Every structure is written in structure tokens, then in C-alpha cells.
Image (cartoon, rainbow, N blue to C red):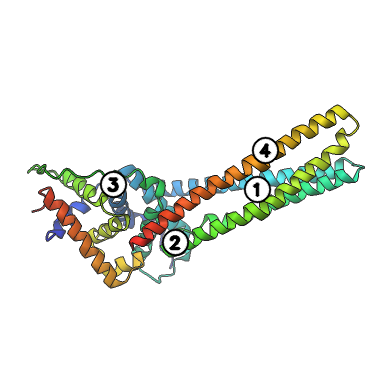
């Protein structure tokens, strides 16, 4: 390939006129930033709202049974776990593009470990608290009506079983499979270097 | 002094676009990759410490971004070139460029990045820094890629 200079001339002839103007680029950056933050903020806000509702219920509805108090405490604790873990993940949205390929692979491996920890520990703790919380909280309201009690507990048990046994493992498997594929692809690319 | 983002964008976006185009061979996807690169540049600009040249830093972000765009790269067209058909004599610049992109698209991912940077006239030392390679390794890789491309061009009666 003696005529590299010819190739360079052809290469530089690429039409770059379709690129957005700087002002448009700034608008897109602002929009991107907003949309990323909004998604996370919406989740955090929902968790704060649910926790706040539960806290206000504690003060407004004077429960008499210990089970209800424990249930309220369980749901509030689960809400707090959700808030804290989501606030903690905001920082991870940024500053990953400026990593070398080796650092990025390390980052992905760390994400894998974090997700496994979240699935096995944090999520189990949060979901256990909310499950026990709901089951305990429900009792005071329905225990005087046998049929209502049976139907309520049957429905909530089915819902919790579906969440525990189907939704939760399926979501984790799906995410883990995707992450593993990304890691393998990055390793393949890294091997080319 | 902190560099101005708009000036940086004006100066480097065509270069980044061409490198992305060399990698992905699709103008719309290359524009997406360019946009994602400058979002990352904008996000990380405050942490840029002048430890490397600004162009090196930006192209490192761009090339990393390309290599990580797995979903997009699945859509890259890498069909083999027909090697018995001679090229028409009066080719336009656009046709020549399209042919060049096709040849590059047949290379491995990192080879596409390297040749794009070579065609951008970057010194080998800078390419080595961008890709985290040694100078010797970079020189060897560039030599091999040029050989591969030369075979493709000769097979198609191009640039003789």
C-alpha cells in the first residue's frame, strides 16, 4: 500500500456536514443528562413517597397490635434500603467512559460482583422485610373476618411467591446473561490488542 | 484554563465522526457514537488534567466508546467483497470512500480503530497511547493492517 496519502485524501473527504451544530449538541447533552437523572430521581422519589406514606400511616392510624407495628417497621426499613441503594448508584452512571479497556473490564467484573451481592444480600433483606412487613401489617385489618382474612392472605402470598420465585430470579438471570455477554465480548476485543 | 466545550466540539467532532464511521460503516450509527463520545467528553471535561494531549484524550474516549458499542456493532455490514469484479475506471470520490469503508469493515474491531487513526494522520506514538499499546506493538499492527488492506485493494483492482 504505497499510496497511503491517496487513501488519506479519500478518508478526509467524508461528509461531516450532517453532524449537529454545537448549540444542538449542547441541547442534546442537557436532554440526555436530564433523562438519565429523571429516571433515577423518579425511582428514588417513589421510594421516598412510599416510605413517607408508611411513616405517616404510623402516626395517623393508631394501631393496637404489635404485629402491625412490626409490619410498619418492616415496610419502612425496606423503603429505606431502596432509597439508599438507588442514591448510591447515581454516581456509577458517570465517569465510566474515560476508562481504559482494562479498567473497563475491571469495572464490569465489579458490576457483576455488586449485582450478585445485591441479589443475594441486599435484595433478600429488602424483600424479606417488605414481605414480612406486609403479612404482619395486614393481620390487624382482616383478622376479625375469616373469609376476608383467608382471601387477603392467599392473594398476598401468591403475589409474594411470584415475586420471590419467578420475577426476582428471572430478572437476575436476564441481567447476568447480558452482562456476561458484554464481558466476554470485551475480553475478545481486548485479546485483539 | 478549562477548554471550552463548544470549541472542542467544533474542532474535533469531524475527526471523531470519521473514526466512528471507519469503525461502524453506517452514517447514522457513527453520528450516534460521535454524540455519545461528546456527552462523555462533556461529563469528564472537568477531570481532564492535561496529562495527555486533548486530541489523544478525546480519541481515547471515542475509540473506547466504539469498542463498547456492542449492540450497535452487531449491525455492522461486513459482507465479503466480490473479488472478480474489476472496479469501474471513473469512480467518484464517494464511491472510493464507500469502498474504503467496506474494506475496513472486514477487519477486526481493533484493526478498524487503528487504521482509522492512521488515516487521521495520527503519529504512531499517539495511537499507542490511545489504545494502551507499546510503540513496537502498534508499529507491527499498523504494518499488518496495511498489508491486509493492500491485498483487498489489489484483489479488487483498486489503487494500483
Foreground mark, 1 or 3, reads 3
Asked which secondary structure carries label 4, the reply is helix
Label 1, secondary structure: give it.
helix
Q: CA distance from mark 4 to mark 1?
A: 24 Å
- Looking at the rendered structure, whether the residues under marks 4 and 3 are on a common chain is answered as no
Quadrant in which residue A189 is drawn: bottom left
Separation (CA) of disc 1 from disc 2: 27 Å
Q: Which mark, residue A98?
A: 2
User: Picture coordinates of residue B114 (x, y %)?
Assistant: 28, 60
Residue A22 appearing in the image: no
Between A157 and A62, the residue placed more toward the observer is A157
Secondary-structure class at tag 2? loop
Q: Are marks 2 and 3 in contact (CB under 8 Å)?
A: no
**Residue drawn at x 75%, y 45% as measured from the top left:** A130
The residue tagged 4 is: A162
Is B28 left, or right, of A90 in this rendering?
left
Residue A54 lies in what quarter of the image?
top right
Look at the image and tell me in which quarter the C terminus of chain B lies.
Answer: bottom left
**Residue A146 located left or right of residue B99:** right
Query: Which quarter of the rendered picture does the N terminus of chain B lie within?
Result: bottom left
Q: CA distance from mark 4 to mark 2?
A: 41 Å
Classify B44 as above or below B96.
below
Query: Which residue reaches farthest right?
Result: A64
Front position in the image: B138 or B62 = B138
On the same chain, marks 2 and 3? The answer is no
Mark 1 — residue? A44
- Residue at 58%, 54% (x, y): give it: A115
Q: Find disc 3 in the rendering and name its residue.
A: B25
Viewed as shown, does residue B14 lie left or right of B41?
left
Amino acid at each position: 500500500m504505497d499510496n497511503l496519502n491517496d487513501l488519506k485524501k479519500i478518508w478526509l473527504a467524508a461528509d461531516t456536514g450532517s453532524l449537529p451544530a454545537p448549540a444542538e449538541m449542547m441541547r442534546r447533552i442537557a436532554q440526555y443528562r436530564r433523562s438519565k437523572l429523571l429516571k433515577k430521581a423518579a425511582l428514588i422519589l417513589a421510594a421516598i413517597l412510599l416510605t413517607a406514606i408508611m411513616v405517616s400511616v404510623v402516626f395517623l392510624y393508631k394501631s393496637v397490635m404489635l404485629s402491625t407495628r412490626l409490619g410498619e417497621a418492616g415496610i419502612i426499613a425496606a423503603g429505606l434500603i431502596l432509597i439508599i441503594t438507588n442514591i448510591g448508584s447515581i454516581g456509577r452512571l458517570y465517569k465510566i467512559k474515560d476508562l481504559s479497556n482494562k479498567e473497563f473490564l475491571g469495572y464490569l467484573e465489579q458490576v457483576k460482583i455488586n449485582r450478585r451481592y445485591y441479589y443475594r444480600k441486599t435484595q433478600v433483606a429488602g424483600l424479606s422485610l417488605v414481605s414480612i412487613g406486609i403479612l404482619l401489617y395486614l393481620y390487624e385489618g382482616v383478622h376479625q373476618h375469616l373469609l376476608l382474612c383467608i382471601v387477603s392472605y392467599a392473594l398476598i402470598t401468591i403475589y409474594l411467591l411470584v415475586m420471590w420465585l419467578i420475577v426476582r430470579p428471572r430478572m437476575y438471570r436476564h441481567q447476568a446473561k447480558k452482562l456476561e455477554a458484554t464481558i466476554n465480548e470485551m475480553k475478545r476485543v481486548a485479546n485483539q490488542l | 484554563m478549562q477548554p471550552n466545550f463548544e470549541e472542542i466540539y467544533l474542532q474535533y467532532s469531524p475527526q471523531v465522526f470519521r473514526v466512528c464511521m471507519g469503525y461502524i460503516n453506517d452514517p447514522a450509527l457513527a453520528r450516534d457514537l460521535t454524540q455519545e463520545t461528546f456527552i462523555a467528553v462533556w461529563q469528564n471535561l472537568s477531570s481532564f488534567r492535561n496529562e495527555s494531549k486533548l486530541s489523544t484524550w478525546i480519541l481515547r474516549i471515542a475509540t473506547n466508546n466504539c469498542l463498547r458499542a456492542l449492540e450497535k456493532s452487531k449491525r455492522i455490514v461486513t459482507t465479503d467483497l466480490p473479488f472478480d469484479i474489476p472496479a469501474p475506471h471513473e469512480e467518484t470520490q464517494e464511491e472510493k470512500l464507500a469502498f474504503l469503508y467496506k474494506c475496513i469493515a472486514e477487519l477486526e474491531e481493533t484493526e478498524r480503530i487503528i487504521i482509522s487513526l492512521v488515516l487521521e494522520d495520527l503519529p504512531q506514538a499517539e495511537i499507542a497511547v490511545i489504545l494502551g499499546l507499546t510503540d513496537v506493538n502498534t508499529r507491527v499492527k499498523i504494518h499488518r493492517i496495511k498489508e491486509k488492506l493492500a491485498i483487498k485493494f489489489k484483489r479488487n483492482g483498486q489503487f494500483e
